[in-house]
Image (spheres, rainbow, N blue to C red):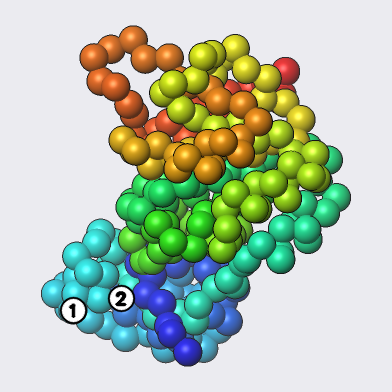
Amino acid sequence: MRNDMIFGIHAVSAVLGSDPARFIEVFVLKGRQDERLLPLLNELQRLGVTIQQAGRKALDDKADGGSHQGIVARVKPGKQYNEQDLDDLLDGKENPLLLILDGVTDPHNLGACLRNADAAGVVAIIVPKDRAAQLNATASKVACGAAEVVPLIRVTNLARTMRALQEKGIWIVGTAGEATHDLYQSKLTGPLAIVMGAEGEGMRRLTRETCDDLIKIPMAGTVSSLNVSVATGICLFEAVRQRQG
């Protein structure tokens, strides 16, 4: 079985809180005993997890140059979700909010989108199996723990999954520069999925055609588009604002 590496205090804390049985071994920076790490290390030791001290270069190598904050862990893979899990995740949710990412291939952006989704109360993120970033150590670190709590569903056919959601009464809104009305003119209440496309390219044609509505973020400056994770946060929290109102 493939094992994963995670790094950073938030990522390790999230696994510790959600599924501590996943830990195989933990590597901590030699001499690093500050107040943020000590509670983590004490709990890991209480659970019987092997903790090894390592030099900075060894940790840098294990984290592939990422900002590890002095802690790296080797863990068993988390639960893998697919389209068959959607019914269970939506069961009992009266007003679900979903996020669909089409063509987001940068793990930094995936991690930031996971963090936004967690903060906005998103039920799940749906991505295609191809042309999608992997949930690797970098994405988990950027997600600051959200990767452990927001289900990431990989689907074989994104348009087919979108049509299945529509049959369940979920309204699907895509973001596109050619949209005729903007985010703040659209209705984002009720069961909803927001679709974000890749930077520059946007959504694929079939994804765009399957959406119920297209919206855009109004841009006042000289840049033509926003980073996809920034745009995702803007759209999700406009939906949150409308739904709370």
Q: Residue at x 33, y 10 (%)?
A: 220
Q: Is residue 74 visible?
A: yes
- Closer-to-camera residue (62/69): 62
Q: Which residue is mark 1?
A: 58
Instruction: Determine whether 228 is above or below 52 in the image.
Output: above
Q: Kindly identify the amino acid type of the residue bearing the numbered disc 1.
A: Ala
Q: Residue at x 71, y 66 (%)?
A: 84
* Residue 118 left/right relative to 222: right
- Closer-to-camera residue (162/196): 162
Q: Which mark is residue 44?
A: none
Q: Kindly identify the amino acid type of the residue bearing the numbered disc 2.
A: Val
Q: Position of residue 149 (x, y in %)?
A: 59, 58
Q: In this rendering, which labeled residue sits more in front, label 1 or label 2?
A: 1
* Residue 232 left/right relative to 170: left
Q: Which mark is residue 28?
A: 2
The quarter holding residue 75 reads: bottom left
* Residue 177 left/right relative to 224: right
The quarter holding residue 223 reads: top left
Q: Residue at x 26, y 70 (%)?
A: 63
